[in-house]
């Protein structure tokens, strides 16, 4: 799955962004399949906006986001849903867990959304153990700390098949040790699928062996 | 799909406004029941009317004439049927056979023989032989015969026996005696008068007139006719079902009358049909409102879970999956309602069949195909409305 940007410009940030140079905004960019992509961005330069454009849940832009050679708008809702189940996964900055479900149910929801799950249920326990969240799996989403929620959101993004993983400040609530564990798990899962990722963050980091760096 | 729907159950609460939903379900049940009862009552009624088990020779003969109004009095031409009117009557679907009633154009006087001292002015009429059920050997006349077979109306003998003879101190006469009486028939016009023998061969309830064979009538009108042949003022039709509302309407629309007694059943039938239609109509109205409430309920469920549904879609749930899940919450209830209504109607029909059987009226003990078709139709309609509502609101999220 190939993702291409053609002169992408967020309408609300247009004036501000024209005054500075960017590797992404208003450029032609192609993300090569399987690449580990880091996008470094200061606050307020549209980091989350970009992730939402790439995932097609915000549409207030000029230019194009092309997926497999077609703009997002060319796909209907059911086709987009299938792509989100099989080709593109996401870790939101605001995590977006269901509070009425337990941590395990939040992960399972994504695992069984596809009629033929990619991983068996035991995989959840395995991943939870790697991220030190085994003990919270049965807790309701409401009672989890931000750090725990973030790790659950990471596991949720990894129990489905994907070719691209979008991450918006995925380690913002984690300490150094847990960040290392999470990054290792993500890297393992991406390699297992030959998948690439696009990660946005505020600073430089050494969590992954990045193939490409962009400045937003 | 199962485990996913289990989780959806925790996210999309269909519990909101459950009472409303149950009330709509009850409404749907009642609507379905009313519609099914209307359908079944209609088919029972047609069974009573048309099935062979219940048929006691419903085909009937009706003599039609125009209603004489005050405005028409004295102008006999106005009571005649024009050739166009006759053609129209012949063309009606409920007319199986059609015949003209020919009246005599000469004077007739009948005298009883011997001591009876009975003489009366009379007239004759004739209808095609196929409208009569008298044996052929009695009912024929050929040129030169001096004896004329005659059919009397039953009412005529009754009037004589129970009205006239008692008050005049005359003997009452049986049908057999009347048939044995040699009557003297004087036929005359202004120039000639001739005598014939009259022989009563039968009595008729069907046609209230003094009938002679059509062959005699033609011959006698030719021979003794005073006036030019007048038009037809009475016609006879054979109809399979005198209670047919179309027939009654046709008569009323054209100002024709006939023996009202024979049409009486038609009134009952119209009343029953009206009641059945009203019941069915209320069923339909109720169905409409049930559908409305269902749609609103679905809308409410979707609106109350809007944020959850949005997140589900963002995470990759297909609108198709959501539609299937939501329908799966409602459809089983509809099927239960359908089955319950069918059971109830079956019970009612069994009871009705048993009750009617005691009056020698047979209807089937089980609801027929129309009822099953009705259930399928109503459920199909409910399902389609649900699918459309769900699709509309899920896609709008």
Image: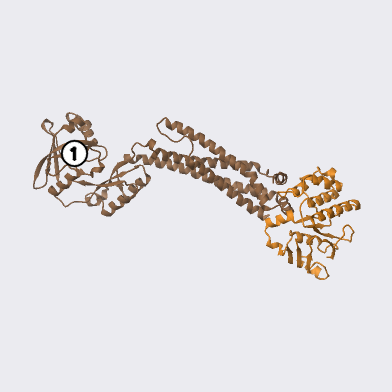
Chain colours: A orange, B brown
Task: In this rendered view, identify the residue nearer to me: B28 or A175.
Answer: A175
Q: Is residue A161 left or right of residue B350?
A: right
Instruction: Measuring from the top left, give residue A191's x and y in whole percent.
Output: 82, 56
Residue B171 placement: quadrant? top left
Question: Residue A177, relative to residue B44: is it above or below?
Answer: below
Name of the residue lying farthest toward the right:
A176
- Residue drawn 81% across and 50% down? A155
Q: Is residue A200 left or right of residue A58?
A: right
- Residue drawn 76% across and 53% down? A161
Residue A58 placement: quadrant? bottom right
Instruction: Measuring from the top left, give residue A204's x and y in whole percent.
Output: 89, 61
The quadrant in which the N terminus of chain A is found is bottom right
Task: In this rendered view, identify the residue nearer to me: B197 or A118.
Answer: A118
Q: Is residue A23 left or right of residue B296?
A: right
The quadrant in which the C terminus of chain A is found is bottom right
Q: Is residue A167 left or right of residue B291?
A: right
Task: In this rendered view, identify the residue nearer to me: B66 or A62.
Answer: A62
Q: Is residue A166 visible?
A: yes
Residue where numbered disc 1 is placed = B150
Instruction: Measuring from the top left, give residue B350's x and y in whole percent.
Output: 48, 33
Numbered label tally? 1
- Residue drawn 48% across and 32% down? B351
Instruction: Measuring from the top left, give residue B254's x and y in whole percent.
Output: 32, 50
């Amino acid at each position: 799955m190939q993702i291409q940007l053609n002169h992408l410009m967020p309408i609300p940030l247009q004036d501000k962004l024209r005054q500075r140079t960017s590797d992404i905004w208003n450029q032609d960019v192609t993300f090569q399949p399987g690449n580990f992509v880091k996008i470094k961005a200061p606050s307020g330069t549209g980091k989350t906006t970009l992730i939402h454009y790439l995932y097609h849940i915000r549409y207030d832009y000029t230019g194009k986001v092309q997926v497999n050679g077609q703009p997002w708008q060319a796909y209907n809702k059911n086709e987009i849903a299938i792509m989100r189940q099989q080709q593109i996964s996401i870790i939101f900055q605001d995590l977006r867990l269901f509070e009425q479900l337990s941590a395990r149910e939040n992960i399972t929801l994504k695992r069984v959304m596809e009629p033929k799950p990619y991983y068996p249920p035991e995989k959840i326990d395995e991943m939870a153990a790697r991220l030190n969240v085994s003990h919270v799996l049965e807790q309701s989403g409401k009672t989890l700390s931000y750090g725990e929620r973030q790790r659950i959101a990471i596991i949720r993004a990894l129990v489905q098949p994907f070719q691209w993983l979008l991450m918006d400040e995925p380690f913002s609530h984690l300490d150094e040790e847990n960040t290392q564990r999470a990054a290792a798990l993500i890297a393992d899962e991406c390699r297992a699928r030959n998948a690439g990722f696009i990660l946005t963050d505020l600073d430089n980091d050494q969590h992954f062996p990045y193939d490409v760096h962009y400045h937003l | 799909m199962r485990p996913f729907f289990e989780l959806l159950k925790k996210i999309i609460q269909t519990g909101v406004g459950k009472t409303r939903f149950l009330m709509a379900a009850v409404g749907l049940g009642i609507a379905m029941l009313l519609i099914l009862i209307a359908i079944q009552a209609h088919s029972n009624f047609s069974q009573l009317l048309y099935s062979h088990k219940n048929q006691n020779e419903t085909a009937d003969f009706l003599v039609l004439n125009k209603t004489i109004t005050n405005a028409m009095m004295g102008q006999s031409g106005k009571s005649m049927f024009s050739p166009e009117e006759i053609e129209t009557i012949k063309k009606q679907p409920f007319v199986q056979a059609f015949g003209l009633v020919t009246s005599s154009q000469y004077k007739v006087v009948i005298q009883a023989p011997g001591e009876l001292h009975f003489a009366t002015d009379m007239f004759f009429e004739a209808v095609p032989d196929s409208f009569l059920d008298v044996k052929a050997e009695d009912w024929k006349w050929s040129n030169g015969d001096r004896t004329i077979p005659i059919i009397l109306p039953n009412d005529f003998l009754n009037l004589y026996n129970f009205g006239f003879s008692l008050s005049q101190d005359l003997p009452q006469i049986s049908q057999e005696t009347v048939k044995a009486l040699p009557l003297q028939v004087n036929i005359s016009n202004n120039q000639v008068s001739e005598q014939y023998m009259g022989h009563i061969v039968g009595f008729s309830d069907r046609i209230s007139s003094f009938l002679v064979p059509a062959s005699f009538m033609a011959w006698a009108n030719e021979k003794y006719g005073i006036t030019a042949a007048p038009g037809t003022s009475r016609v006879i039709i054979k109809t399979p079902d005198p209670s047919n509302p179309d027939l009654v309407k046709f008569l009323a629309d054209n100002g024709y009358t006939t023996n009202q007694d024979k049409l009486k059943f038609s009134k009952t039938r119209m009343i029953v049909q009206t009641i059945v239609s009203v019941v069915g109509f209320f069923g339909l109205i109720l169905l409409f409102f049930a559908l409305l409430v269902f749609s609103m309920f679905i809308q409410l469920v979707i609106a109350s879970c809007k944020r959850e549904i949005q997140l589900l879609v963002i995470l990759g749930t297909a609108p198709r999956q959501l539609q299937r899940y939501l329908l799966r919450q409602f459809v089983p209830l509809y099927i239960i309602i359908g089955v319950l209504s069918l059971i109830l109607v079956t019970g009612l029909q069994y009871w009705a069949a048993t009750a009617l059987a005691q009056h020698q009226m047979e209807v089937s003990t089980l609801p027929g195909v129309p009822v099953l078709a009705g259930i399928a139709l109503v459920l199909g309609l409910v399902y389609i409305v649900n699918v459309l509502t769900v699709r509309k609101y899920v896609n709008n999220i």
